[in-house]
Amino acid sequence: MPTPNEDRMYLEIYDAIMEHRLPAGTKLTEEGLGEIYGIARHTVRRVLAKLAADGLVDIERNRGAYIASPSDEEANEMFELRQALEALVMHKLIDKTRKSDFAALRDLVARERDAYMRGDRPQWIRLSAEFHIELAKLAGNSLVVEALRRLVSRTTLLISATNPTGQQPCSFDEHAAVLDALEKKNHAKAQQEMTHHLSQCACRMLDRPSQRFDLRAALGKITPPH
C-alpha cells in the first residue's frame, strides 16, 4: 500500500513532467529524490518504477532513471499505434455504450474544460489523458486499456505546453466531438473524429527542451538555508 509521501512524490513528479518543468532526458537519482522528500531510497525506487510503468520514466540498467525522451521515430510509431488501438475502441463502443456512460464522459470533458479555463494545467492534463483511458475501459478489453495508458502518458510528454487557446493538446472540444458521434451511433463519424483528434495531437509534439534547471525548484521545493 503506497504511503502518503509516496503518492505525493509520484503526483509532484508527474505534474513536473507534464508541465515540462522537468525536461525530457532529465536524470532522476534515488539519492537526490530521497533527500528532497525525506524518504528512503527503496521507497523512491518504487515511485520511479510506477512512473516507468506509466511510460513517463525510462530506467536503464547501470545508468539509472531518466524522464522519457522518445525519439521522433518512436513518437511517430506511438501515434500510429494509438490510431490503431483507439480505432478498435471506437468500433467496440458503438454497440456497448449506454446513456449513463455518456453522462459520465461528458462530465469528465466538462471538468477538463473547467480545469483549462482555471489555468490548472496539471489537472487539465490528467483529465485529458483520462478521457482516452475511460473510453478504452468502456470497450471492455483490459489489455487495450493498459497499452493505451502507457501510450497516452508517453505521447503526452511530446505535446507542447505553449500552444495557444484553440490549439491545446488533447482538446476538450475534440473529445466532445467524439462523444457526439458515438452518442448518435455514427460509427464512421466517431472514427473520423478520433483520427482527426489524434492527428492534431501528433502535430503538437514538443521540440526537446535543452534549458538548465534545478531539480528541487522544478518540484516546487524550497532550497533549505545553509
Image (spheres, rainbow, N blue to C red):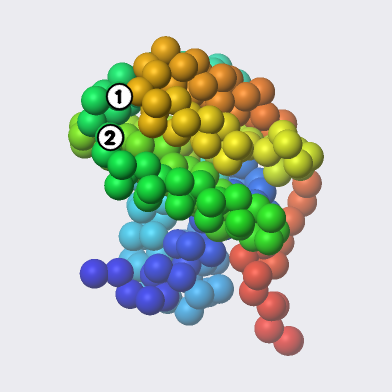
Q: Nearer the viewer, residue 170 or 113?
A: 113
* The quadrant where residue 86 appears: top left
Residue drawn 65% across the image and 70% down it: 220
Inspect the image, locate mark 1, and give the three-letter code of the amino acid beneath it: Ile
Number of marks: 2
The crowd level at tag 1 (other Cα within 10 Å; few <14, some 14-19, many 20+) is: some
Residue ID for mark 2 = 97
Whether residue 108 appears in this view of the structure is yes
Residue at the extreme top: 188
Residue drawn 44% across the image and 42% down it: 131
Expressed as whole percent of the image width and height from the top left, the position of residue 205 reads: 65, 29
Quarter occupied by the C terminus:
bottom right
Expressed as whole percent of the image width and height from the top left, the position of residue 108 reads: 46, 50
Expressed as whole percent of the image width and height from the top left, the position of residue 207 reads: 72, 31
Residues at marks 2 and 1 touching, judged by CB atoms closer than 8 Å: yes
Q: Nearer the viewer, residue 148 or 51?
A: 148
Expressed as whole percent of the image width and height from the top left, the position of residue 84 reads: 38, 17
Residue 128 left/right relative to 219: left
Inspect the image, locate mark 2, and give the three-letter code of the amino acid beneath it: Thr
Whether residue 58 appears in this view of the structure is no
> Marks 2 and 1, how far apart in space?
7 Å
Quarter occupied by the N terminus:
bottom left
Residue drawn 45% across the image and 62% down it: 10
Q: Nearer the viewer, residue 106 or 204?
A: 106
Position of 189 relative to 141 (above/below): above
| The label number, if any, that marks residue 129 in the structure image | none
Residue drawn 56% across the image and 19% down it: 196
Q: Secondary structure at mark 1?
A: loop
Residue ID for mark 1 = 94
